Image (tube, helix red, strand yellow):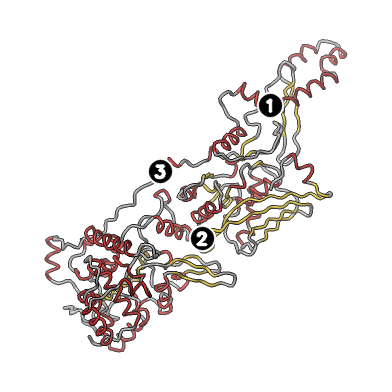
């Protein structure tokens, strides 16, 4: 706790040792989740130095110089004592510059330079510039959400992060651009009325952290009186200029009486009726919020401390709603792609059940164009999914447009084939989300799949099964969500024209080259791809149709309606068991929700034997057939659904010569 002025005399000096202690709240990131951190500040006698403990990284240790300069340039005094700052819990490694503001405010409050009402319910986040300006930090959404769960009601943070923090309901947001915006003088609206009738005006002056000085200023009336008395004798002049001891005592009593809270309030009401002082504003705010905000008292007009006055900085929720914008409309549509109806149907099935898909075909057949339009038919994010996706983007520092609210469209990530394993999965000393997590609840598109290093592709096997990534470090294990639809494209051979029947380009690749090219994608990874679709060159009929601009019925709007209906059917079926998509079925849930007709079961067993499927591939055929049956609104899986699901695994068929 902080000591009030009434307690300082008893508690500041303990057995002759100068001791002061204070605590504020800040936060850091653990994975994509925020973790509350107590910033404890202790001032004691000793050589002037600052120690930060609690497993800080280099950015936090360097904050000492940022905080020192910011405090000085904001008009305060950095304490010339031994300063110890503890970041608790001490066994959690912290990184980043988000603690700067909490450290600075803790030092100012503990050194008795400011009064900070309501600090026990306040979260402070922000990086300080040397002049006291605040710079934005990543991961604010997760930190503010953690503060709300911890019971904190208010957040002070950089203005650039305010809109992002406002996405969390039930928390008061105060966005500032400079630390000085927090402070007001205690006597800002309580200046002492000039007493020109006595010829002396009395006011106080002081340096932050130092005792105040009472200053007496000779007014213009007194100066004129002195000029008139100049014609008198020296003795007479003395009678005019020397104030008797009785007069001094009466004036001192008068000045002291004016410094009481009652006198200050009376003067305020007389001179500024209708205006509310910062102290009164804080007390009024306390009454409105039904929460007691204790102010140290009694407060004198000569008190040199500054008051943390937040009410003018409160971010208006109405203002936030006015800034909310609808998601930008996309101009991409499957109507732009002529022909390839079987590929469009396969993509619609993949979107309906979040099944992984691989398009295989020669160059220029529209593989990339088809996959890039896949987000246009996916269902929108639910509120819970949107919050999770937005948290991931915030932690990664990629959430730029906070005025639009939570992310409403599913992510689409398309990394270059030069990406590394940490870039794909996540990494660094304190891991950050990789591409698989940035694609959470959306699509991860790997164009030209064999061009990716095999070591990079193999790390996808575990996230595709578990829908999350575990990254182990010496001090902790970090978990990131990774529930995504994997979409890939590739050529059939290194030159790209195998089996294309191209009139000019003919395949020149040997069998060994083709084998090495396809071997870059391992069998276990192919097992996890539900749909493997060939994309041939468009036919003459497709070209004629495109010239007349005749739609084929597969446009994004119609496909999206079908996908939405199919997804709603799945949500209703799996309500209460934590499953949203058919691709997430496993174990007993898979057996319970995939009822096969007799002929469908026979067909599946025959395909399992003839194609040499693994048990994983068999289960994936069942999940895919379940989605195809849902498209047709059938409860039972029939033979036609199994047959369509099997024919989509074309690379399995090629291995057996089928």
> Disc 2 or 1, which lies upstream in sequence?
2
Query: In the shown orientation, is residue 397 left or right of residue 331?
Result: right
Q: Which residue is painted at 15% across and 61% down in the image?
A: 551
Q: Quadrant of residue 242?
A: top right
Circle count? 3
Residue at disc 2, secondary structure: strand
Q: Position of residue 495 (x, y in %)?
A: 27, 80
Which residue lies under the disc numbered 1? 262
Which residue lies under the disc numbered 2? 33
524 up-or-down from 327: above or below: below
Q: Position of residue 370 (x, y in %)?
A: 26, 66
Q: Position of residue 265 (x, y in %)?
A: 65, 26
Q: Which mark is residue 450?
A: none
In terms of depth relative to the viewer, which is nearer, 501 or 579? 579
Query: In the shown orientation, is residue 97 left or right of residue 334?
Result: right
Residue at disc 1, secondary structure: helix
Q: Quadrant of residue 213?
A: top right
Q: Which residue is painted at 13% across and 64% down in the image?
A: 545
Which residue lies under the disc numbered 3? 321
Alpha carbon separation for disc pair 2 and 3: 26 Å
Residue depth check, mark 3 versus mark 1: number of the one nearer the observer: 1
Image quarter in which the C terminus is found: bottom left
Q: Position of residue 110 (x, y in %)?
A: 70, 47
Crowdedness of circle 1 by 10 Å Cα count: few (<14), some, many (20+)? few
571 up-or-down from 220: above or below: below
> Disc 2 or 3, which lies upstream in sequence?
2
301 up-or-down from 173: above or below: above
> Disc 3 or 1, which lies upstream in sequence?
1
Alpha carbon separation for disc pair 3 and 1: 42 Å
Can residue 551 be spotted in the picture? Answer: yes
Query: In the shown orientation, is residue 524 left or right of residue 178?
Result: left
Can residue 361 be spotted in the picture? Answer: no
């Amino acid at each position: 706790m902080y000591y009030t002025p009434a307690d300082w005399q008893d508690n500041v000096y303990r057995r002759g040792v100068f001791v002061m202690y204070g605590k504020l709240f800040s936060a850091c990131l653990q994975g994509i989740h925020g973790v509350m951190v107590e910033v404890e500040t202790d001032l004691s006698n000793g050589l002037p130095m600052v120690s930060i403990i609690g497993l800080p990284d280099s950015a936090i240790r360097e904050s000492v110089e940022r905080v020192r300069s910011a405090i000085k340039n904001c008009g305060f005094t950095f304490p010339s004592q031994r300063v110890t700052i503890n970041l608790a819990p001490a066994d959690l490694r912290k990184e980043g510059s988000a603690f700067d503001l909490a450290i600075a405010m803790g030092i100012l409050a503990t050194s008795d330079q400011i009064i900070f009402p309501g600090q026990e319910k306040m979260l402070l986040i922000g990086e300080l510039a040397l002049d006291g300006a605040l710079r934005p930090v990543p991961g604010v959404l997760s930190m503010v959400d953690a503060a709300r769960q911890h019971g904190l009601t208010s957040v002070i943070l950089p203005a650039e992060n305010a809109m992002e923090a406002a996405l969390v309901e039930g928390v008061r947001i105060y966005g500032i651009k400079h630390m000085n915006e927090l402070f007001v003088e205690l006597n800002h609206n309580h200046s002492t009325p000039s007493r020109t009738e006595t010829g002396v005006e009395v006011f106080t002056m002081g340096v932050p952290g130092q005792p105040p000085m009472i200053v007496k200023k000779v007014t213009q009336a007194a100066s004129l009186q002195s000029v008139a008395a100049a014609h008198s004798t020296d003795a007479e002049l003395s009678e005019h200029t020397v104030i008797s001891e009785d007069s001094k005592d009466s004036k001192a009593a008068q000045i002291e009486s004016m410094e009481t809270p009652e006198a200050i309030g009376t003067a305020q009401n007389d001179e500024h009726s209708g205006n509310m002082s910062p102290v009164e504003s804080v007390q009024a705010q306390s009454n409105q919020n039904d929460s007691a905000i204790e102010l140290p008292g009694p407060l004198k007009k000569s008190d040199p401390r500054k008051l943390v006055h937040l009410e003018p900085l409160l971010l208006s929720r109405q203002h936030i709603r006015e800034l909310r914008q609808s998601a930008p409309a996309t101009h991409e549509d499957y109507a732009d792609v002529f022909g390839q109806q079987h590929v469009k149907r396969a993509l619609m099935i993949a979107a309906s059940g979040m099944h992984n898909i691989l398009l295989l075909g020669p160059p220029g057949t529209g593989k990339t164009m088809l996959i890039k339009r896949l987000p246009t038919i996916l269902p929108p994010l639910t509120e819970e999914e949107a919050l999770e996706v937005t948290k991931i983007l915030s932690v990664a520092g990629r959430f730029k447009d906070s005025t639009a609210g939570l992310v409403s469209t599913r992510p689409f990530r398309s990394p270059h084939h030069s990406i590394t394993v940490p870039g794909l999965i996540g990494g660094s000393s304190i891991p950050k989300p990789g591409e698989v997590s940035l694609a959470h609840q959306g699509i991860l598109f790997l164009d030209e799949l064999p061009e990716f290093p095999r070591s990079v592709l193999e790390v996808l096997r575990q996230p595709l099964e578990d829908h999350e990534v575990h990254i182990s470090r010496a001090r902790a294990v970090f978990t990131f969500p990774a529930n995504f639809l994997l979409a890939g494209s590739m050529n059939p051979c290194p030159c790209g024209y195998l089996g294309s029947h191209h009139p000019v380009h003919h395949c020149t690749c040997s069998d060994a080259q083709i084998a090495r090219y396809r071997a870059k994608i391992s069998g276990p990874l192919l097992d996890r791809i539900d749909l493997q679709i060939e994309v041939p060159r468009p036919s003459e009929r497709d070209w004629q149709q495109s010239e007349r601009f005749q739609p084929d019925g597969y446009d994004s709007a119609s496909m999206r309606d079908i996908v939405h209906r199919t997804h709603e059917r799945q949500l209703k079926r799996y309500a209460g068991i934590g499953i949203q998509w058919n691709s997430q079925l496993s174990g007993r849930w898979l057996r319970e929700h995939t009822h096969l007709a007799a002929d469908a079961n026979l067909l599946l067993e025959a395909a399992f034997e003839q194609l040499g499927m693994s048990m994983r591939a068999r289960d994936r055929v069942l999940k895919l057939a379940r989605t195809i049956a849902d498209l047709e609104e059938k409860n039972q899986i029939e033979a036609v659904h199994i047959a369509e699901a099997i024919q989509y695994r074309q690379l399995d068929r090629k291995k057996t010569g089928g």
